[in-house]
Image (tube, grey):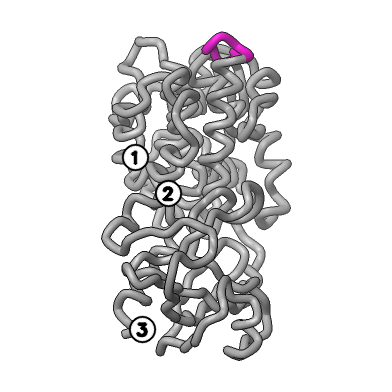
Amino acid sequence: MSPVASHLLAWYDRHRRDLPWRAPPGAAADPYRVWLSEIMLQQTTVATVGPYFRAFLERWPNVEALAAAPLDDVLHAWQGLGYYARARNMHACARAVATQHGGMFPDTEAGLAGLPGIGPYTAAAIAAIAFGARATVVDGNVERVVARLFALQTPLPDAKPELRRLAATLVPERRAGDFAQGLMDLGATICVPANPKCILCPLTAECRARAAGIAGELPRRKPKKARPLRRGVAFWLTRDDGAVLLRRRAPSGLLGGMIEVPSTEWREAGWTLGEAARLAPAEASWKLLPGLVEHGFTHFQIELQIAAARIAGDGPDGIWCAPDRLHTQALPTLMKKVCRHALDGGQ
């Protein structure tokens, strides 16, 4: 075992974080818990995931229970975690494990990677943590630790293949799962992005960036491109009984399968009310509410105006929901903002 692995594992045994999905020291990890946590942790912080993980586990304690759940229930429980494609893929994965694998997760990277929503990183993490496979697990924390250990100055994302290759040289034959979690913990608590706590690090003697005095500068990153701005108009249509019209988005794509307030397409150019009204769900006296609803997605920013109208009778087909029942719908964060803005009259 290399000095890096031995020093890191000794540190991990003393300082490992107590996380709800981790098995106690010496106990076998539950593949379901490992998988569920890894899906939730994609692009989301540990602090945010904790309460969601506990709630999911209480409601769906095993993969068969999650597989049997309606997708709407899963999407509703996922609200606040973002990136809803993860929830749809997670549900599809649970069904695949339950129906095609007898409720047992495959124990190899290749087998895991064949399941919906499981990419190379997640397959490696589950294989190492749940099954003890000698897999190379590289997330953002691990990239930072490895970049500093080897003083790699190639900027991200170009450095990713080399960081993975270097990380693979460090993985021990035994305790690969603990080693992976140790690197993650080290990156999250000691080898942090700004002002790394090098004096507390168990790998100080092996760290080339520390020796060169550049630990805080690594990993380098290419400048981020500005996110483009898209614009649209959301249609807040109510009936005489106060119910508001909602609809379900297409099952694939951004916010797929979620419930939304109907809207125009989202595009770079702005919209006039007359142009937008031609795409409205019903003919009505549409009026724009004051103000804008703003939201940021990973690859673009969005500004929505809200056009409001009331219609007599039953109205067009869709999901008609009383305002005090909106919380029961699987509304993504953007649509929750739209609802709040409309209910406040644009104020």
- Checking the image for residue 342, the label placed there is none
Residue 17 place in picture, x, y as percent: 31, 32
Residue 154 place in picture, x, y as percent: 69, 54
* Residue density around tag 1, few if under 14, some if 14–19, many if 20 or more, within 10 Å: some
Residue 294 place in picture, x, y as percent: 47, 76
Q: Amino acid at mark 3?
A: Gly
Looking at the rendered image, the quarter that the N terminus falls into is top right
- The residue that disc 1 covers is 52
Residue 112 left/right relative to 193: right
- The residue that disc 2 covers is 81
What residue sits 32% from the left and 68% below the top?
241
Q: Amino acid at mark 1?
A: Tyr
Q: Are marks 2 and 1 in contact (CB under 8 Å)?
A: yes
What residue sits 52% from the left and 78% below the top?
303
**Disc 2 or 1, which lies upstream in sequence?**
1
- The residue that disc 3 covers is 346
Rounded to the nearest angstrom, the CA distance separating label 3 from label 2 is 26 Å
Image vertical order of residue 311 relative to residue 22, above or below:
below
Rounded to the nearest angstrom, the CA distance separating label 3 from label 1 is 31 Å
What residue sits 50% from the left and 85% below the top?
286
Rounded to the nearest angstrom, the CA distance separating label 2 from label 1 is 8 Å
**Disc 3 or 2, which lies upstream in sequence?**
2
Magenta stretch in the rendered image:
100-107
Residue 52 left/right relative to 247: left
